[in-house]
Amino acid sequence: MAGLSSLTLSEMRAGLDRGSFTSLDLTRACLENAERFKDLNAFITLCPETALSQAAEKDALLAKGDRSPLLGIPLAIKDLILTKGVTTTAGSKILNNFIPPYDATVTTLLKQAGAVIIGKTNLDEFGMGSSNENSAFGPVKNPWDTARVPGGSSGGSAVAVAAGIVPVALGTDTGGSIRQPASFCSIVGIRPTYGRVSRYGVVAYASSLDQVGTFARTVRDAASILTIISGLDRHDSTSVNLPVPNYEACLGQEIEGLRIGIPKEFFIKGTNPEVEQSVRAGIAHLTTLGAVTVEVSLPALEYALACYYIIAPAEASSNLSRYDGVRYGNRASNPEDLDDLYSRSRSEGFGKEVKRRILIGSHVLSTGYYDAYYLHAQKVRSLIAQDFKRVFEQCDIIACPVAPTTAFKIGEKTSDPLEMYLSDIFTIPVNLAGLPGMSLPCGFDGQHLPIGMQLIGKPFDEGTLLKVGHAFESTTDWHKQTAKVFAE
């Protein structure tokens, strides 16, 4: 039965329509695989009783002829996204016992489409990390090599998909937190344009950078979920009122004549040669399908990493000030006064990396430093966005690596935060410019660790990314290879 959970979303949907199996069969299989691979630590909370009850309800609807797009499909949600009545921790002790009284908009949309939510996935605390080692609930392990990280911060969602526990899962991407784990775990991960998907009910890290997206085993499955969760939401003032295409309808189209920009700034010294070789081979394969390459340059990218690690911590220090031990979350026992309550509640509740970023953010926003750091970073951010706008006059998409290396060992970079931050060097420009980005499996290194190719698109042009990704996927076999844990 556990093998059912390894089906793609499209295969599950077709099987349910034919009556080959039931939603209860699928949900039991997913829960069995979650138990089988529990040592990967992909989940913080599993909801077996609720999930099985939901599955039985979906089977009754299927029997009546209901064909809602996700009816009876089990999936998982990053534990940064609110789920009514189900604990949402953001991977932090400070929210260890927080049970939301309402659903995030994306949660509501998945439920309305008929999905069965089996649980909440592990993550770096508040989304702050590139390895999923910063969770208060322990590190997540990569199913391709359990001694290595799955990437972060949405590592739990990536592993849940890569290990065949669920066909799709939601994540969030603030500086690469969907694309990098997707690359490290050899699955598809898409981060849509800022404003395409509602952030209402998503625990905030850096509000101008956060975006909900999805993990899947195929581009078609990613397109299906993205169609469902996209669109205007009156609860989110940053949500954009633009028509949402049927992204699945974009698949299968020719890419003859499509222009692929190759920015020299993404192929730099220090990148693993095997990563660069695989990505360049992936781009070459796209040219055999009719695409053409254009050499482009994004000079402001030199400052992107420094820019990001000013803006993101600044916004984090503001957003996380609400966790003070008064209204919800961790509350220090027997405080002497209000200052002691604030101090101990936050000291006990926040992890080391979160504290580091709060301190950085508070510093760059403080009197005397705001103009020198935060204001300058915002100006650099504008230059980065302008560079992308100029380059997209020369090309339709950009192709480049997702990360400079393959998955590194657990504990390898925890003692050097700067080295850890460099893992994001190829992903954060997309967030700073608010663009859509996608990771596709495109190869393996000599240790058989996955390598992802990143496609970057114009604002609200996710359809082109999915079209190109599907063309690549349909003519290669990288996505069909399975993780090491399946052989154990």
Image: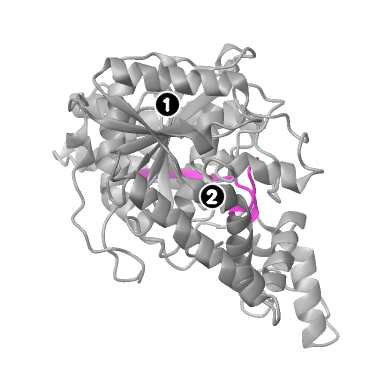
Image quadrant where residue 276 sits: top right
Name the amino acid type tagged 2: Gly
Toward the viewer: 115 or 199? 199
Compared to 398, does 145 lie above or below? above
The numbered mark, 1 or 2, whose residue comes first in the sequence reads 1
| Residue 418: percent from left, percent from top | 73, 47
Q: Secondary structure at mark 2?
A: loop
Color style of the picture: one colour
Q: Residue at x 72, y 72 (%)?
A: 363
Q: Residue furthest bottom?
A: 337
Q: Which mark is residue 5?
A: 1
Amino acid type at image mark 1? Ser
Direction right: furthest residue = 336
User: Could you say which disc has been placed on residue 175 in the image?
Assistant: 2
Q: Depth check: 21 or 306 in front?
A: 306
Separation of residues labelled 1 and 2 (CA atoms): 30 Å
Does residue 115 belong to the magenta stretch?
Answer: yes
**Camera-nearest residue between 484 and 471:** 471
For numbered disc 1, what is the local secondary structure?
helix
Query: Within 10 Å of the Cα at label 2, are there few (<14), some (14-19), or many (20+) other Cα atoms?
Result: many
Q: Is 429 situated left or right of 16 in this image?
A: right
Quarter of the figure with residue 356: bottom right
Segment tinted magenta in the rendering: 114-131
Specify the quadrant of the image occupied by residue 466.
Answer: top left
**Does the segment drawn in magenta span residue 271?**
no
Question: Is residue 244 toward the left or the right of residue 353 in the image?
Answer: left
